[in-house]
Structure formats: structure tokens, C-alpha cells
Amino acid sequence: MKWGNAFNKILRDYGVSAKWLSEKTGLSQQAISAFRKGKSSMTTDNLDMLLSELPFEAKSTFFALVLGGHLPPAQCPTIEELAEDLPREKKKKLAIILVEAIAKESSQERSLQKVH
């Protein structure tokens, strides 16, 4: 994936705006938006500045996308590490998603047991 596309994806996935990054880094919103849309390039120093404001998991995702979608297993953070880094609201959302997934699996298992 192209650098700008990967950057755009992680900002969308992690709910980060160009305005917030601009305030944190001093780079203009226009420069950040143009990079996200693939309309301009970004110097390595500026990209480093932008990425330094993002959580570890967002940076890992960015480089995984740029490198073809895969991280070597030794460099992948554990689920526990990822969960620790999440803000409280995202932890709540993750807990709800997990409970719903388990409930759905249980329901499917019960349906299969009735068939057999």
C-alpha cells in the first residue's frame, strides 16, 4: 500500500484527525491532508513527527500496511500489550465486541447440537 493511503487508513481506524495532528506537531492541516490523499509526499522527518504522536499499535499497523500487510511474528505486540495501550472507552467497546462474539458462537453451537 502507498504511504499516504496507509497513513490515511490508520488515522481513520484510530479516529485521529489532521487538525489534532497539526496541533500536536505544528505541521499544517493542509500538508497532512494532502499526504493522506496521496496528493503530496512527506519528508521522513515530518512523517516521523506525525507517527510519534500515534499509539504503538497505529505505528505498527502503518508499517505493516506499507510493507505489504504483515509484521514478522516476533515484532507483533501481544493482545495484552495492545489492550493495555487502549484508552478506557475503546477497552469497553472491545469488551462488548468480545462478549457478543462469544454469545454468537454459543448460540451457533446450541443450534448445531439441536440438529445432531
Image: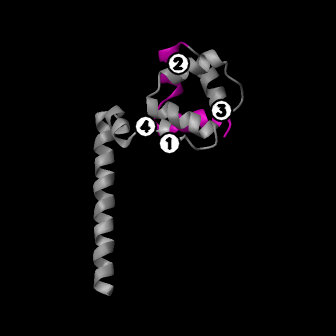
Asked if residue 37 can be seen in this view, the reply is no
Label 4–label 2 contact, CB within 8 A: no
Label ID, residue 73? 1
Q: Residue at x 55, y 17 (%)?
A: 49
Q: Is residue 102 above or below residue 39?
A: below
Q: Which residue bears the numbered disc 2?
A: 22
Q: Which residue bears the numbered disc 4?
A: 77
Q: Position of residue 102 (x, y in %)?
A: 30, 61
Residue 23 among magenta residues: yes
Quarter of the image where the N terminus is located: top right
Residue 65 among magenta residues: no
Q: Describe the element under mark 1 as helix, strand or loop.
A: helix
Q: Residue at x 48, y 33 (%)?
A: 58
Q: Is residue 57 left or right of residue 80?
A: right
Q: Which residue bears the numbered disc 3?
A: 3
Q: Residues within 10 Å of mark 4 (few under 14, many from 20)?
A: some
Q: Earlier in the sequence, mark 2 or mark 1?
A: 2
- Res 46 → quadrant: top right
Q: What is the span of residues highlighted in magenta in the rendered image?
A: 1-26
Quarter of the image where the C terminus is located: bottom left
Outermost residue, bottom side: 116
Q: Describe the element under mark 3 as helix, strand or loop.
A: helix
Q: Earlier in the sequence, mark 4 or mark 2?
A: 2
Q: Describe the element under mark 2 as helix, strand or loop.
A: helix
Question: How far apart, in angstroms, are the residues tagged by discs 3 and 4?
Answer: 22 Å
Asked if residue 109 can be seen in this view, the reply is yes
